[in-house]
Image: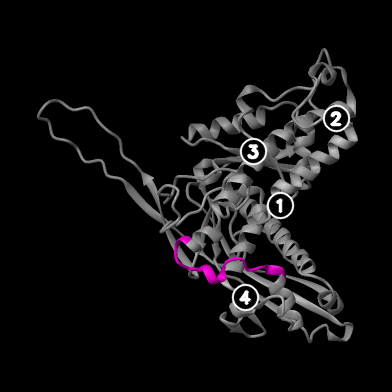
Amino acid sequence: MQFPAYEAKREELLRIMDEAKTSTPGHFDMDQVKSLTGTKADKLAKVQALNAELAELKAVKDAAERAGGMSGDGARPYEGYGSAGPSLKGRQHLGKGESFAGWLKANGKSDADTEGLHFGRFIKGAVTGDWRDAPAERKAMSEGTLTAGGHTVPTPLASQFIDLVRNQMVVARAGATFVPMTANTLKVPRLTGEGSPAWRNENALIVDSDLSFDAVTFTARSMARMVKLSRELFEDSDPSAADIIANSFAQQIALELDRVALRGSGTAPEPRGVLNQAGVTLTAHGANGAAITNYDFWLDSVGAVRNANFEPNAQIQAPRSETSLSKLKEATTNAYLSPPAGLAPIPRLNTKQIPTNLTVGTSLDCSEVYTGDWRMLGIGIRTGFEIEFLKERFADNLQIGVLAHLRADIQLFHPEAFVVDTGVRG
């Protein structure tokens, strides 16, 4: 099982260490670090931060390998919203570290005969017709549903692909709750009122204070991605070429799911993201936006989420915002400012899916910052997806098109758990 989040962090760490000429990860001479200025000091500081994150990701990776597979998205299980302990049987929600593959297995939707399938071998066999190295994948494919022009990907391979998508999603790293959908629509109950206990005198009547519920409805919406590759590449390569296709699909789909989870318009067929959900707090910063001069935007948003009785577990922003924060300096010494203690336990995650060219008043360079308890963001994903091999459409160039079709939806279990700062300038 691959863990792209871990491998990517490891590669980034090794590259920065080489550029900065630092020592072994985890061993730093702090006097040496303090004496450095400029680019090298910045790199050393980033090495320390990456090393800490790498250690956390490695712990998840090791635990996943021991358990036979987790999502690899870099954190721990979420025990709320339908969770009933470590078992995935009968569960309606998956939190960080819990995989679709594990959920399918726990709920009887896969068996021993379909374990160990390889997505690359599946694609190569389907394109070339040569299944000599993929008998198990051929058997699984023959049992799948043939559609007009393609096949429903066998369930175990579909779950592997979905987990690969999750590994690359920023909102997954933040703690989003994933909802496996085995039908086109799915209602998920949510608690809207808990009542409250009350003091009473002896022999006095106990007043009822019931829990109240409603539901959010996930409706699977369609998203597609296509790549073209030469027929010779498929015929002459090992399955690694098809692995590249799988990773390309996963990366592009992950980016789009991140975008709609944050900024989706809600205009069909696009799901509605956090920004456009009723009940989410929107904090404007002046008629024309405001430049970042301190950490106050981030601190105020954390406070607003806590005032709504939720605990923020991540803030998601554009990379430009992180750069602006990193450049903040103390007025007299010109030393770089560290984040205040109130932000220390809350990771800031960066994605280019948040634009930096939004128009606010007369300003054309505005962005947004998203703060929330990301467990309250639900991402419903159909447990299967379809893949089509377009052999005739590009035949005159000896190319084959591979078209993947995934269905998903976005819902908020509690919109009040989120705050979006708008009009944030560099």
Tell me where the magenta segment starts and ends, as one range. Answer: 106-120
Disc 3/disc 2 C-alpha distance (Å): 21 Å
Q: Callout 1, which amino acid?
A: Pro
Precedes in sequence: disc 4 or disc 1: 1
Dot 2 falls on a residue whose secondary structure is loop
* Spot occupied by residue 202 in the image (x, y as percentages of width and height): 12, 26
* Spot occupied by residue 224 in the image (x, y as percentages of width and height): 68, 70
Precedes in sequence: disc 2 or disc 4: 2
In this figure, which residue is indicated by the disc labeled 1?
4
Q: Vertical placement of 128 versus 260: above or below?
A: below
Disc 2/disc 4 C-alpha distance (Å): 47 Å
In this figure, which residue is indicated by the disc labeled 4?
136
In this figure, which residue is indicated by the disc labeled 2?
22
* Spot occupied by residue 426 in the image (x, y as percentages of width and height): 79, 36
Q: Callout 3, which amino acid?
A: Glu
Q: Main secondary structure of the magenta part?
A: loop
Dot 4 falls on a residue whose secondary structure is helix
